[in-house]
Image (cartoon, rainbow, N blue to C red):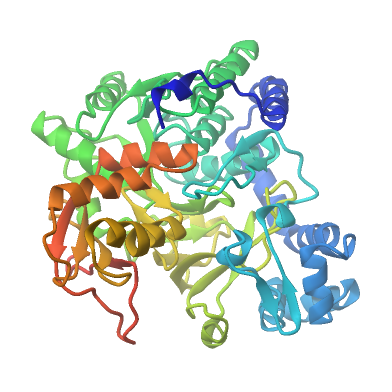
Amino acid sequence: MSASHAGTPLRSAPALAHGARFLASLPPYLRKRIDVASARALHERALATRENRFFEMVGAAAFDRPQSLLGRLFRHAGVGRGELHGLVEREGLEGALKALFRAGVYITVDEFKGRAPLVRGSLSLDATPESLRNPLARFHVAAQSGGSRSKAPPFLIDLAYVRASANAFLLHLDANGLASSRKATWESPGAGCRFRLLKYACFGPRPDAWFTPVDPRDPDLDPIFLWSQRAMRAGGFIARAPLPSATIATRDDPSPILAWIQSCLMAGEVPHVHTQPTALVALAIAARKAGADLTGAFGTTLGEPTTVARLATIESCGLKAFPRYGTIEAGPIGYGCRNPTEVDEVHFIRDLHAFIQPGENGPDVGLPPRSILLTALHTAAPYTMLNFSMGDEAIVDESDCGCALSSLGWNPRLRHIRSFEKFTAAGITFDDTEVVRLLEEVLPRRFGGGPADFQLVEDENDQGEPVLILRVHPRVDDLEESALGEAFFSVLGEGSPIAQVMQRALHGSVTLEVERGPPHMTRSGKFTHLHIRTREHA
């Protein structure tokens, strides 16, 4: 996108309407604060009403709207309102969800995004995110999931759901003695960092800082990023609850965030930063080079797997980190266990969601047995997710670990959480269709070869820093490796505004190497576009 785009006005009437609604709703949201006692009370009520809220959401989305996507799915499965109540009474909520899955009531991420039709026997439907929008939610904040090159409409988020997510985050912090910590986020411009700052603003000290590797004032970025930042700061000014502006801190030069952490520690305060694990790896390496001890500082990681090597590097400078599992569409799903058996282990947030796994029935519908099928339970959730596959799988542990999050009823625990449908590196998630187009069409057209001659391999070095490898079949002749790398990054930056931000963040934080060799195959002989290289220490 050329620099002339910087002057493009926000001329979309829906965008202006969403912006006006957000600005009007933000001051009362910021003035209403929560504390640990109220967070615990809300949490207990939410746990006690899981089934009732499930009935309310399904009733509004399916039975009150029989021609909706969910309404037609339930009718095809032969399940009415009375049958659903009886099913939950006999089997419990999770047991009922398993029965619904076997009857064909589930949604895959390809169906949700309109990449594949929803087919259940004789029923064939075209699903879209809009068709699963929650009719019970009010919408204040427009956001867009990263990576899609299509002009799909943004999804909209109710500030009540942002507050519910903040409630869960406060309980996570409280369980680790961090409820009064100083808070900052280190993320690129976009919906994620906006929601993070809005959650931070609900409790304890107001958020201190927003560090970003991508300047929202970059003239090559869509102006929505800059105007979103300005709208948030304006709402904070009106509410007398100031929100921070952007401070540039790249992986190559994280000195601003290092200085902020050190200033908090010197003042006897506890700093806490929310970012990707590989960002904390870069911070830890910089701290070691500067001879800085960050003992007493904490982080919550998101967006990519936490591995043994990454965590060891993070902790080498004294920093303590906890994993978080979640998505922009669903919000927080799990927070890190204090007594984990694996470094990425999280407690499932049962007051916001329910989940099942398809088990032996999964392969029959193209899902791994350990797939996570998520169901939303908060009436202000953006979508009426019901047995929704986000493309992730995990190992589930039902045992009691004895930590503070277990006492909240946030069980079971999930570990070894990995995506089987999305491409994620350095905390940046791209739509898999974009990666497939790049590998099967763009690169072969420019450099030769065919659709199975290019493969991405994700690896890490001994310190846990991300390494992305472009593996090219030896039959592709006369390959100019530097041109190949430039083509890779430039194509990923095409398309939607959020893709521009992701491309810049990825380009500045990940080493891209070119490797010659035939593609790695699965044990069943299947070619995958992204291969995650297993390391013995991870």
Q: Give the quadrant of the C terminus.
A: bottom left
Q: Is residue 416 left or right of residue 233?
A: left
Of the pair 442 and 106, the residue shown nearer to us: 442
Residue 31 percent coordinates (x, y): 66, 21
Residue 142 percent coordinates (x, y): 63, 36
Question: Could you say which quadrant of the image residue 62 lies in?
Answer: bottom right
Q: Residue at x 81, y 79 (%)?
A: 76
Of the pair 190 and 410, the residue shown nearer to us: 190
Whether 7 is drawn above or below 287: the answer is above
Q: Residue at x 41, y 37 (%)?
A: 500
Residue 286 percent coordinates (x, y): 16, 33
Whether 15 is drawn above or below 43: the answer is above
Of the pair 439 and 345, the residue shown nearer to us: 439
Whether 147 is drawn above or below 4: the answer is below
Q: Give the quadrant of the N terminus.
A: top left
- Number of marks in picture: 0
Question: Could you say which quadrant of the image residue 530 lies in?
Answer: bottom left
Say whether residue 155 is visible.
Answer: yes
Residue 487 percent coordinates (x, y): 27, 48
Of the pair 514 and 382, the residue shown nearer to us: 514
Q: Is residue 291 left or right of residue 20?
A: left
Say whether residue 389 is visible.
Answer: no
